[in-house]
Amino acid sequence: MTVIYRKDRKVLKRVDYGAAKNSLMGVLAALLVYALVTAWGGVYRAHELETLIAGGAVVLVTAFRLWLIARFDALYGAGPARWRKLFGAGLILHALVWGVMPVWLLWRTGAGFNFFVVILYNVGVTTALGSSWMAGLRVRQLYIVLMFVPILLGLFFYGGMKEWLLVVLVGAYTFYLFRLYRGQYELFWHAVTRERRGEQHDRRRDHHAGTDIQLSLVYRLAHELRTPMNSVMGMMSLLEETKLSDEQREYLQAAGQSGKLMLALIDDVLDYSRILTGRIMLSPDYFDLRGTLEQALEAFGPMAQSKGLELSAVVDRMLPRRVRGDRDRFMQVLTNLLSNAVKFSDKGEIRLDVDFTEESDNEGVLRVRVSDQGRGMDTDTLRTLFQDHFLDGAQDAFAAKHIGFGLLVCKGLTEAMGGSIGAESVEGEGATFWFTVRLGMQTNMNEPQKLLSAMDGLQALVVGSAGGALAGLQEEFEALGCQCQGARDYDHALQALRAGQREQSEFHLLLVDTRERQELALNLCHNVLVDPALRPVKLILMCTIEERAQPAIQRLVERHGLVVLVKPVHRSVLRGALERLLGVPRAVPVRDLPLENAEALERRRHFRLLLVEDNEVNQLVTKGMLAKLGYQVKTFSNAPAALSLLQRETYDLVLMDCMLPGMDGFEATRVMRESERQEGRPRTPIIAITANTAEGVQARCLAAGMDDFLAKPVHLEEMETVLRRWLPLGSASDDHEEGEGE
């Protein structure tokens, strides 16, 4: 039932004017998108007459809507109601044209580039309309129907698994937009109605209620986006375990990176909302600090190299190995700064400096600096960089557009972790972003004594590396008791090696970087490898991930056993290479790895798991993960049927979706726990699975009687870790039954 609100004329005019103004970009973008798919996409050459007809429709509708925008004052002054009817008619005509457009492209060119460009445009304009023109709910809902129903029908009859999957995704998004429009419409006019109340108490109460409603909408949006993302990411996780060609694996990795980026954006929105309301929460625990830094370097190394950038790190040799803090929040801040550095740099080096200052026996302050040689920022931009109104783009529209509110999230997170954040920059010369966090620490573990003994008194020579990379290598070698220096160029390095042989002050290690010039670097490696006098010199080549697969480097590896390290080079890979070159037995760290041997899989097969999940795609994904891990599972789509089965049969563990139709997962868990208590049955572990990551949800799960928590999208490794925690091998049920529930 739609609530009827009394609409103030002044508010209506403001709403109508805002809708006209905001629709300008979408109207003009229609021409650009049409030109893109017909000209660059090649549609005009293949279907000239149809393209001209479609173009005529686009131009006529665009011209009509531009006329309404340009003549707003005159037309609105003559009759506001008439203007709204004309504006609504323009929206309907626009939806008719652009709803049919992708269907035409689908049947003419397939589900390729042109089709997806138009789909993206349709998604963009319908999403933008969700927060615009609150004067006409029914017209906007009809706009959604006309935009997406033809697409759904076209995809359905076009056939194919990929197209049917798109039908599910587009249909879900259409349904979500339809409900979102109504919710925002009612929220807007309800807020306008409340503004008319004059009492101070009511205004204060409404402010808090409005904040809660906004947060609720944000959390709901995040939940709605995470649910289909769970299916997508889960399917890709399963696909990654199959046999793929190199090209297919490359495409899969690119899709995975895009999925992770979308999840990161969703998390940023949630975190910013939490920061604004003071609801940010940390989950401190001990973690490997250096390993976390190395993970970030490995993630951003290929991104930097693809732009011709050098990514290097100089890490304090006294950095504690294990620290106590919120690893995920720390990683979130670090990756945000590294991402911005790569994004805003077109040349030079990106350098990561990490230092740790002990303030007591068990606590200290970590300082991280990320420096680049990009475009830099002016003084005004620097001053407002970490303030809310920076997003308005008043000082630097380019920076505001590309950085978004990521820096505001970083500011809130660093302050929550007991630190601070700042930036320094000279316009045209790059920028340095820094942040500090307060961390607990454990006493350092001993350095590897065998490698220390083997490296003691040796000398290393580095050539071709950028300044930051050289400084980082020197820090690592000096930590092992080895002297390290840099050479001016490749020729100078060869001369220094031969001079050292003559003067009995030889270099024992040579590290060659391909950064300055690959051809000269490989020539130097070849000369060292074939020269009998230089045979004692241990050689390491450092190159980019793309260079690693080049034939010239492959030949050196195959013929001479050349050791090659992919940049950025960090401690673990460097020490591994040194141990291999010097013949030092490598200590393999004990890790909590999944048991994937045949015996473990066979023992897991006797566990009986029950999955309660109403989404069929998520059912398929979760069952695939469990099968990959060796577990058998029975599925149900509703709680009452699952509870009825649990009264008759025994299961080792239940995976429970929280947002079930009818009786939700929370209520189902409470009923199950009460039944166990009354009948004296043993407690069955229940694992919550939900896309809702708002604060308090995990606590609500535990309060309802659940034992653990998995957030969608669920990754295979996370699933494996949680199941091994609650299902130790040797405790499986003797009897088992495999099948599907109703």
Image (cartoon, rainbow, N blue to C red):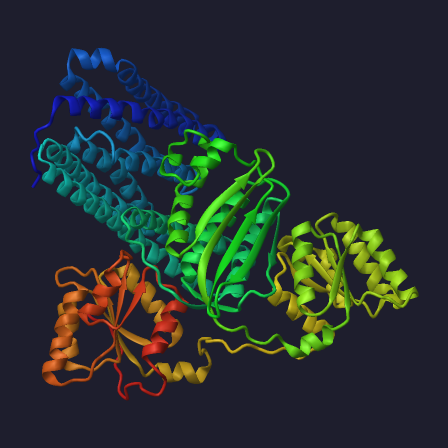
Q: Percent position (x, y) of residue 394?
A: 41, 29
Q: Nearer the viewer, residue 669 or 174?
A: 669
Q: Nearer the viewer, residue 394 or 683?
A: 394
Q: Percent position (x, y) of residue 471?
A: 67, 55
Q: Nearer the viewer, residue 338 or 323?
A: 323
Residue placed farthest to the front in the image? 360
In the depicted structure, whether residue 130 falls above or below residue 475: above
Residue 245 in view (yes/no)? no
- Residue shown at the point (32%, 60%) measured from the top left: 712
Quarter placement of the N terminus: top left
In the depicted structure, whether residue 631 falls above or below residue 573: below
Give the number of callouts. Answer: 0
Describe residue 108's horizontal placement relative to residue 666 as left or right.
right
In the depicted structure, whether residue 222 falls above or below residue 431: below
- Residue 502's image quarter? bottom right
Residue 224 in view (yes/no)? yes
Q: Percent position (x, y) of residue 584?
A: 69, 78
Quarter placement of the C terminus: bottom left
Q: Percent position (x, y) of residue 204?
A: 15, 41
- Residue 675's image quarter? bottom left
Describe residue 338's horizontal placement relative to residue 7 as left or right.
right
Describe residue 212's horizontal placement relative to residue 529 as left or right.
left
- Residue 157's image quarter? top left
Q: Nearer the viewer, residue 732 or 280?
A: 280
